[in-house]
Image (tube, grey):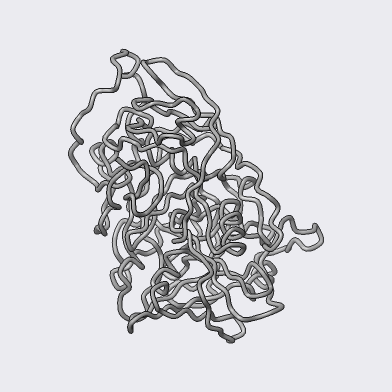
Amino acid sequence: MSNEWPPPDAGREGPQGPPPPPQGPQYPQYPQVARYGAVPGGSPSATPPPAQPPAYSDPSAHRRRKGVGVLGVIVIATIVSLIVGTFAGLAGYVIGRTVDSNPATTAVAPLPEPSSVAVDPLPADQIPESITEMVGNVLPSVVSIAIENNGDQGSGSGFVIRPDGYILTNNHVAAPAADGGSLVVFFEDGSSAEAEIVGRNSSYDLAVLKIDAQDLPIVALGNSDQVNVGDLAVAIGAPLGLEGTVTSGIISSRDRPVTAGGRGELAYINAIQTDAAINPGNSGGPLLNSAGQVIGINSAIATLAPSFNGEAGSIGLGFAIPVNSARRIAEEIIQTGESETPVIGVTLDTTYTDGGSRISEVSPGGPADAAGLRSGDIITSLQGRETTDSTELVVAIRSYAPGDTVQLEFERGGRSQTVDLILGGSQDIG
């Protein structure tokens, strides 16, 4: 049995099984979907999975919190607008989770200061006084992206992170052009340039593009650790192909476990949630704070029903990849064309629903093995953040970087224990 997931050939750690197939929009149901909804690698079900007893018979096992809360499973749509034709996976449906209590805020371990990506903070005298000023400063660095492959076309968004032509976007925007397609980026002033893919990380739904240019205006990257619920949030992109569209709202939540992806590639995002309107075509565009700094990369939306051309539309539930994670991935891709995804070296039992994440197999010689974890152990928190299921555990892990030390709390034989674990890394080239 492999210790990686999605499937072994994808080379990423976690629950086994193929990603869920595209599915039509669904309304939340109570309590069936909330309790027995999809798990990573599964599909939604209105009936409970077969019950499996825990690896021990301690009575306290029955007192653990079950399920993922009353809001249950919501349907998330990756948000690339189709202009002509259809790209398989460009607007695929994926499954997300919400929880019935606010997860503990987990401080992301400090990342090495990037040498080639824009850095924060902005000097005080450069902080814009209004959204109008903010937008004027940032729009020249935001691009719309046209994708074409075998006659099919699509669009997305991105933004310039280095003056010599490096652009950050979503993997699901770039992926359709990875096998011989073309990418063209368009700037606010009407100019355009052909782009090539430098590298992709499907685990984080991120990609870096490169155009032949110099002295481009760049965005300022903020600090997603400092985001607070209620803060101003501004999204810029090309929804439905409408370049340079600006929407605003607030930060609705943080550390929201969300899965997103398409074309057989599933990303687990420790997302920033916002009610700023995000629609197909906003994918890969920036989410800004009140200082005009990028705090997230818009990646997915929740939807209750299809809208324009069968695509999902905004209902005020948008999700962005925190920029602190994106910064590390972008820097690694720029330097090597590849990037690493943090792993703990286990296979998780996705049929387990009694709270926490039960280990079905420990990879010999991996981080979990070195830390003394065993098959049957139930991981309940990582670095003080409660993880009630496999999805929450994976997004918590991916808030960190390979080589970081994290504290895991787990149950064995009905007794709670803690252990320090050094995260390993698996190469992800998209």
Location of residue 378 with respect to 260 vertically, above or below: above
Outermost residue toward the top? 59
Residue 221 placement (x, y as % from top left)? 66, 59
Say which quarter of the image contains residue 163. bottom right
Q: Quarter holding the N terminus? A: top left
Q: Residue at x 68, y 76 (%)?
A: 216
Q: Where is residue 247 drawn, in percent x and y?
A: 53, 65
Q: Residue furthest front?
A: 365
Is residue 297 found left or right of 38 in the rendered image? right
Residue 198 as seen in the image, left or right of residue 373: right
User: Is the residue 188 above or below the residue 230 in the image?
Assistant: below
Query: Residue at image x 33%, y 19%?
Result: 61
What residue is rendered at 56% in x and 66% in y? 168
Instruction: Report which quarter residue 280 is drawn in.
Output: bottom left
Position of residue 210 measured from the top left corner of the image (x, y, whole percent): 57, 74
Most extreme residue toward the right, as rendered? 125
In this view of the protein, which residue sits in the foreground, 396 or 11?
A: 11
Q: Residue at x 53, y 44 (%)?
A: 399
Front residue of 75/168: it is: 168
Q: Quadrant of residue 391 in the image? A: top left
Count up the numbered dots: 0
Does 254 sit left or right of 68 as displayed? right
- In which quadrant will I find the C terminus? bottom left
Viewer-nearest residue: 133 or 43: 43
Vertical arrangement, residue 209 with respect to residue 288, above or below? below
Q: Position of residue 123 (x, y in %)?
A: 79, 58
